[in-house]
Amino acid sequence: MDDQSWRHPDPQAIVQMQDVVADRTWLVLGGAGVSTDSGIPDYRGPGSPPRTPMTYQEFVRTAEGRQRYWARAHVGWSRMSGAEPNPTHRMLAAMAHAGRLSGLITQNVDGLHSRAGHRDVIDLHGRIDRVICLDCRQVTPRAELHDRLALLNPGYEHRIGEIAPDGDVVLDDTTDFEVATCLACDGRLKPDVVFFGENVPKSRVEQSYALVEQAEVLVVLGSSLQVMSGLRFVRAAHKQRTPVVIVNRGQTRGDDLATVRIDAGCGETLSAMLRGGPQSRYGSPDHVFR
């Protein structure tokens, strides 16, 4: 991990954040930087290697593309499914339970906010623990597909490769992998997530915009805002003059829209910010810092 990942937030920036959020209820927009402390790498953080994720068009167009995706995803699933919520997930869940959040929109697909006990999360890009059939639209648990793939490809999941942000693993040769099809219609199976080049479902976008419209403050955690699916909500908040706080390691595409900008990790920043004010105000019990 590079030195920047351990950067402590500037104390003056923490004071500025406290002044902005004050007694306001937060709407949180989270990105990959929220889950890096759970061992899930991000796409664009400082020190992240260049990555070329599979596009939706490539996945649906060729059987070879689906074979490559599912081979890599099968190996990576054990690591992704074993990831645990980190202090950031737990702090946000505690704040939500105390009524300090008006909503949480996550661009992550790992489901860790829900596992931390957070209810009513908007999973903007879907959930990696579900599988959808592109032909009959049936949705099934990812764990069931993993077991089927293990039977079709004995020992394959033990192959070694670098884990990528979406839970797959980099493998050079996947031509010997056997892909499973839908049990209901023999159709094409895809993780129930939004691929690059695919549109976010309209209902999720509308629900997110509705939260932004009513937000007292928008707090962006761990997102570079390089893709429009997240940046549009920051732009909407700024347009209606809602304060925007951005916490992220490295620059973001929304920096010029931020009321306060903190270049640091999410966990370190939330811990410093919450400890700096009355615990009862933010509803953060001591156990979330352990």
Image (cartoon, rainbow, N blue to C red):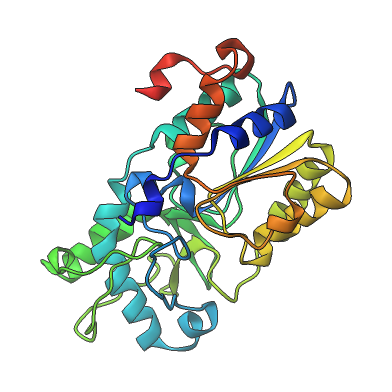
Q: Which one is nearer the viewer's eye here, 102 or 181?
A: 102
| Picture residue at 40% right of the left edge, 74% below the top | 186
Residue 1 visible, this angle: yes
Q: Nearer the viewer, residue 208 or 94?
A: 94
The image shows residue 257 at horizontal and vertical percentages of: 76, 54
In the image, is 118 to the left or to the right of 204?
Answer: left
Name the quadrant containing residue 28. Answer: top right
| Quarter of the view holding residue 144 | bottom left
Question: Is residue 114 visible to the viewer in this orientation of the structure?
Answer: no
Q: Position of residue 70 (x, y in %)?
A: 33, 72
Residue beneath the point at 71% across and 29% down: 21
Q: Dividing the image into 4 quarters, which one contains the N terminus?
A: bottom left
The residue at 79%/56% (across/down) is 235
How far from the left and from the top, in percent, is residue 242?
Answer: 82, 41
- Work out whether 236 lies above or below 214: below
Please identify the quarter of the rendering in which residue 289 is found. top left
> In the visual, does 51 lie left or right of 257?
left
Q: Quadrant of the C terminus?
A: top left
Farthest residue toward the right? 240
The foreground one among 195 and 40 is: 40
Q: Nearer the viewer, residue 200 or 183?
A: 200
- Image position of 260 with respect to 178: above or below: above
* x and y percentages locating residue 2 in the rendered image: 33, 57
